[in-house]
Amino acid sequence: MTGTYTRRGFLGLSAAAVAAGLAACTGGGTAPAPAGQGGTTGPASNDLRWFDYESGESLERLKEQIVKFDAQAGTTTTVDSLPGSGAAVYPDKLRTELLGGKGPDVWRIWGGQIGAPFVKAKQAMDLTPYYQKFGWDSRINTEAIEGMTFEGVKAGVPFTARGIGAWYNKALFEKAGITAEPASYAELEEANEKILAAGTTPLGTGGKYGWHIMRLYEYLLETSAGPELHDKLLTGQESWDRPEVVTAFTNFKKWQDKKWIAEGALGLDPTDVEPQYVQGKNAYTIVGQWTEPEQIQTAKKDSADFGVFQLPTGHTPQRHSGFVEGYMINVKSGNPDKSAELIDFIVQPETQKALKVGSSAVAGAEPDPKESPLSYEWSQGPGKQPFYTIQDQAFPKKVADQYFSIQSDLLQGKITPEEAAKQMQAAVSAWAKG
Amino acid sequence: MGTATLEAPAVDSAVVRRRRRRDGGLQAWLFALPALAVYVIFLVYPALTSVWFSFTDWDGLSPTYNVVGLENYIQMPKDPVVIQAMINNIIWTVVTIFFPVVIGLALAMLLNGKVRGKPVLRLIFYAPAVLPLVAIASIWGWLYNPEYGAINAFLRMIGLGSLAQPWLGQDSTALAAVMVPGIWLRVGFPMLLYLAALQGINQEMYEAATVDGATKSQQFWHITMPSLKPAHYIVLALSLIDSFKVFDLIYAMTYGGPGTATQVMGTWMYFNVFQYYQAGYGTAIAVVITVIAIAVSIPYVRSQTKEHAV
Amino acid sequence: MSSSAEVAPVGTLPDAHVAPTEEPSREPKPKGGIGLTIILALVALVWLSPLVLLVTTALRPLSDFVANGALSWPQEWTLQNFADAWGVGNFATTYKNSMFLLILKVPLGVLISAMLAFALAKLRLRFGTAIMFAVFLGLTIPIYITIVPVFVLLRTMGAIDSVPGLVGPYLAFGIPFEVLVLQSFFRQLPDELIEAAKMDGAGPWRIFFTLILPLSTPALVTVFILDAVSTWNEFLFALILLSSDAHKTIPVGLLNFQGQFSNNNTGLAAGILIAVVPILIAYIFLQRWIVGGLTAGATKG
């Protein structure tokens, strides 16, 4: 027997179960949105609602741009934002709103398995017609679009593709006698030894939520497995119980044993640890270009004192990990056409530049080389290289969490790399089958 | 209520007495109604609706779902994290009831007596409970930092550097590490309740006992403690349930980690409902939490309601 | 448990008397008072010490914090964070909303809970046991799972994204512990007092307002404080049921200090200090009423 979670069905339940007093209580306020699935009723509304997780100045800039759009398109858009806490609380609120029938018209969301549930639950609209209408395929980074394509359905429009690299403190590298950015994994290991000998813990990373320290692991996996195999592993097409994976886990443990990462890194909070390369407590960290404004510039330091390089995998193409963020349209939107227009406006290069998007997926919207020199450097170099989705977005959260448990056990020495590989295979295959 | 009549008073007053004995009647309902109405509408009804979902495979997002009967409940014992969470829950509950209640009682006694500066002290010991959790989690996270944190720095300073370790970063110490702020936060509540309860104790009993030569300790055990029995009941009952339901602090400080080492029922329920899109299963976990907590409260409810059997 | 004292019970009921000031004269002049005070003061200092971090973080510029780390002694001091935090956290609005909720909901909640507690404890409410269990149910349920049904419910009532709309759920979730605590205290009030008042012709309402409530001031104030704190800090429902900036409460406003990739920790610390001040003031003012002051303490036999 299936049940249907419609608002009408819900009300039916309530009428049966609760005293009449409630049913009479419809109160004043906003008119209820159309109940039931799909479709809109009546003429399209020009009142749009945009839901985002921007904060501070960038939120102000976004609002400014949207006001501009409203002026030229004759719409009135309300911008609601739920800042903070990353992918934790925002999807909850979005979910609840969608269930309650009053979801936003457009919402921002991460790609991969964070955005996927909304598509699977048929809450997000298939945007293929709009892709054709506005020509997004030719204006936006192809891989970014793939990050927003779910089982063949283009349900999101990406605006940023954030690549992860190694951001380092030049002074500490010099002090350790490192003259060139490591160009191979072997050189990276050497560099670690030199840095450690000079008295600093090389890599700053924190495993409190699992994903930060995972960035090291997935780089090691890309290095030992190579691009094609890595991709197949991420979709469960190939087994994780294999030598390449064991090598990656072995290396991972090595970093902990050789003290290239802090003891107890597992319990450290990424927000505390990431700035440490700026503070001189670590030599480098694995992070995206947002570190330039958020950590280097907020600490009032000079970008010239820092550098960035792509973690060397020794493969061709040399890839790095990354993730995508973009916009989706509500299937129940009162005005999908205008919503799509609004998105199109936002992903124009001029708007992207005005918004100061640090790693825009839109062609022609590079960061300003004077304001953000390192971000610009990244965008011209590694930023043009292909990327693979970060592991915790490649997998649904449950599988990602299972990985985090394995990672935790491995680094604490409770399981061997071989066992880790086997457990990983068990977790991934269970998901891939389902 | 019975109406007075003029004929056959003996029979009628017996009827009147019977009716008055049964219950407080309409008046009692008038008192009860506002709270009950609000309660049923905004809590009981949503709660029952949620319980319904524990019998489905709803993912928490789609418009449709299937009814799966008891499937979620059957799955639970097979879930290794549930077992771990339950064990953690029990340990957590015992520790975060025992210490706060004992400390809270001690503080209430002391801060009801001959100490100076009581208002300030009462404020200080209660203050942690007033802070938003984001503050608690950040501050204690910094204190526990293995390299730079105050706790390890202090240990090194007093020569116990060998004890300095990554408290939050290893399975063996993570839960215990979170318990410390847990206790720190929870002392205020029993302290307040006991303070209030102490006000209701007849001081003349103490005077009489002192005259009779009873020591302070004897007075404590034979006057204070028994008089506080109702307070003990309510403090323990409420603390038990609150501790058993723990979620916020652990979520904020360790996120259930490292791995799943500090998962408790509350956090595991949250992960399943809100992050794994398994609302049906997660709700089943919530129901289990509720049932256990209610089972524990049965003795308390019995003790309260049997007193007034008329 | 009105007959649990093992010392000889009082034969007749003395009148309620006004309790003396904070140092009751039941014990000989305190000699050890100072020693104990000093020990407690030291314990209190240690107790408070983690909060030093909160204060140092609030008093340093963000650049100093990010450049040196949370546990470093500030190299620069500033009061600017408070002024900035006021804006970033939108405190002008969120204070208004949180205050409104506090002033409306807490006294109302305590009142209706006291009424139900009275009905359960003294008025022999029908189905009392069942209701007690139902009340316990509310205490044991993890509130997270009720969030979606509550959202839909409020949506039906047109009460989404409105501060008064929060009052319903807030009241409901405060009722369990308030009712349980209060009924526990009410049960201890001697039946004889109530019977005496009834003899004088008082109806239950008069008994409630002129006898029960005044005699239970410590319990009422305690419950009031606990409810005020949890209302002020309530986060989940405020998060889900409110959306527009004009309606946010303080805990949701604090999210503004947390960005996608990093937190404005110094602003957050300042914001937290701004947020807790009213509750601390309320607590200082109210806790006097729990002990001594003008409470009329009933004596127990």
Image (cartoon, coloured by chain):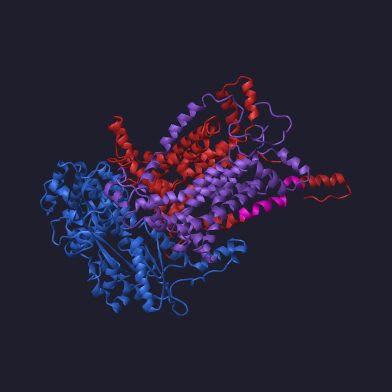
Chain colours: A blue, B red, C purple
Span highlighted in magenta in the image: B19-36
Residue A223: % across, % down: 16, 54
The image position of residue A417, as x and y in percent, is 22, 46
The answer to whether A356 is drawn above or below residue A279 in the figure is below
Residue B248 point in image, percent of width and height: 43, 48
Quadrant location of the C terminus of chain B in the rendered image: top right
Residue at image x 73%, y 46%? B22
Return the x and y of residue A101 as percentages of the image width and height: 47, 67
Answer whether residue A48 is visible to the viewer in this image: yes
Image vertical order of residue B280 relative to residue B297, above or below:
below
Q: Given the current orientation, which residue lies at the most extreme right position? A: B7
Characterize the magenta stretch by its predominant secondary structure. helix
Q: Is residue B54 visible?
A: no
Callout count: 0
Image: C6 above or below C77: above
Q: Quadrant of residue A430?
A: bottom left
Residue C254 lies in quadrant: bottom left
The verdict on residue B20 being magenta is: yes
Q: Is residue A130 above or below residue B263?
A: below
Residue at 62% over, 51% down: C112
Q: Please tell me which residue lies in front, C287 or A206.
A: C287
Q: Is residue A217 magenta?
A: no
Q: Nearer the viewer, residue A416 or C47?
A: C47
